[in-house]
Image: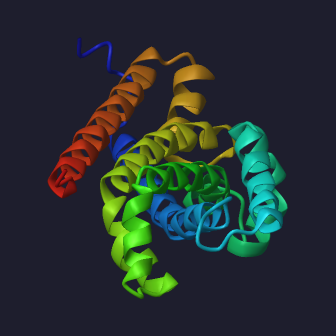
Amino acid sequence: MAGFFQNISWPDIAQATLDTLLMLGGSLALTLVLGIPLGVLLFLTDKGQLSESRVLNRAVGVVVNILRSIPFVILLILMIPLTLLLMGTSLGVAGAIPPLVGGAAPFYARLVEGALRDIPRSTIEASQAMGTTRWQIIIKILLPEALPGLISGATVTAIALVSFTAMAGVVGGGGLGDLAIRYGYQRFQADVMLVTVALLVLLVQFIQWSGDWFARRVDHR
């Protein structure tokens, strides 16, 4: 067994794990910041909702659908000019975050929209009857009522981001994916591939368990 792991450099594994966590944490935070308002906008401007606007809803929906339809590896390449403009580099952790957000934010926005649709229409109508403003309905009614769904959606998005961070290794994004490609695949070091895959699986399992636990804690139905 010791011979099987002879290609493993544990400091490199530790650094790659840290890079993956940094990419995941940074991109997930920005995804939530962008995805929640975008999902709320899609919901509110839909037919029969508080701020119905078919033109705006369709325009935003088209942009979201286009970004969701582009395979992430291609999105990585397409966003290189924008990434260079924003981050000054297209490599490493910093270079991976913009395309990660670009791929995940539209995905999460649709999950947010779906979570808001699950709120009974009668709840919104009752709030309007009591004279609640639109902003108060969003902050005090919609988001709290949809919180379990928002957390579940964030969990699904975080797991998708883990796979995105692995694919970012194709263009030098760093992290466990980069290590798996450069050593596990290109140099045929099966032990490196095994360890990186095992760590990614453990990370996904932890995210799923944590997300399920938080969703149950806030679900009072």
**Residue nearest the viewer, comparing 136 with 5:** 136
**Image-quadrant location for residue 198:** top left
**Residue nearest the viewer, comparing 19 with 55:** 55
**Residue nearest the viewer, comparing 94 with 219:** 219
Quadrant where the N terminus lies? top left
Q: In this view, does 214 lie to the left or right of 166?
A: left
Question: Vertical placement of 171 versus 87: above or below?
Answer: above
**Residue nearest the viewer, comparing 172 with 189:** 172
Question: Vertical placement of 156 versus 63: above or below?
Answer: above
Instruction: Give the x, y percent position of residue 215.
Output: 24, 50
**Image-quadrant location for residue 55:** bottom right
Q: Which residue occupies 45% across, 75% down?
A: 138
Instruction: Give the x, y percent position of residue 149.
Output: 37, 50
Instruction: Give the x, y percent position of residue 41.
Output: 62, 68
Q: Which residue occupies 33% across, 33% down?
A: 199
Q: Which residue occupies 37% across, 58% down?
A: 146
Q: Which residue occupies 67% across, 66% down?
A: 45
Instruction: Give the x, y percent position of residue 186.
Output: 63, 23
